[in-house]
């Protein structure tokens, strides 16, 4: 018999910055400046393996998978 497994792990990260400034030159005139920036990134990793197990009639076979 062949037993196979597959495991995928991943993560997503986002960072952002926003800045706002207001300047007034007189009571009637002002300027507002706003700038923003954001960036996201993602990573994932997949492991997979197939194992052959020889199980004869009347016997029991199993495979144990553990984290490294």
Image (cartoon, rainbow, N blue to C red):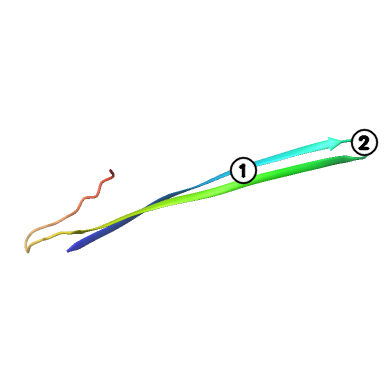
2 and 1 marks in contact (CB < 8 Å): no
At x 6%, y 61%, the residue is 58
Relative to 26, say whether 61 is above or below.
below
Asked where in the image residue 23 lies, by quadrant, the reply is top right
* Neighbours of disc 2 within 10 Å: few (<14), some (14-19), many (20+): few
Residue 27 is marked as 2
At x 22%, y 60%, the residue is 3
In the image, taking residue 25 as reference, residue 40 lies left or right, namely left
Describe the element under mark 1 as helix, strand or loop.
strand
Query: Of residues 25 and 59, which is closer to you in this image?
Result: 25
Q: Position of residue 26 (x, y in %)?
A: 92, 35
Q: Position of residue 60 (x, y in %)?
A: 11, 57
Q: Which residue is mark 1?
A: 16
Describe the element under mark 2 as helix, strand or loop.
loop
Asked where in the image residue 22 lies, by quadrant, the reply is top right
Relative to 29, say whether 41 is above or below.
below
In the image, taking residue 27 as reference, residue 49 lies left or right, namely left
Q: Position of residue 36 (x, y in %)?
A: 68, 44
* Neighbours of disc 1 within 10 Å: few (<14), some (14-19), many (20+): few
The earlier-in-sequence mark between 2 and 1 is 1
Compute the Cα span from label 2 to label 1.
Answer: 33 Å
At x 87%, y 39%, the residue is 30
Q: Quadrant of the N terminus?
A: bottom left
Q: Quadrant of the C terminus?
A: top left
Q: Position of residue 29 (x, y in %)?
A: 91, 40
Q: Count up the numbered dots.
A: 2
Relative to 62, say whether 13 is above or below.
above
In the image, taking residue 42 as reference, residue 7 lies left or right, namely left
In the image, taking residue 6 as reference, residue 52 lies left or right, namely left
């Amino acid at each position: 018999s062949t037993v196979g497994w597959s495991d995928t792990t991943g993560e997503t990260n986002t960072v952002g910055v926003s800045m706002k400034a207001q300047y007034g030159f007189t009571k009637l005139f002002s300027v507002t400046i706003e700038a923003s920036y954001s960036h996201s990134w993602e990573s994932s990793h997949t492991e997979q393996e197939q194992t052959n197990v020889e199980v004869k009639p009347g016997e029991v076979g199993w495979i144990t998978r553990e984290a490294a």
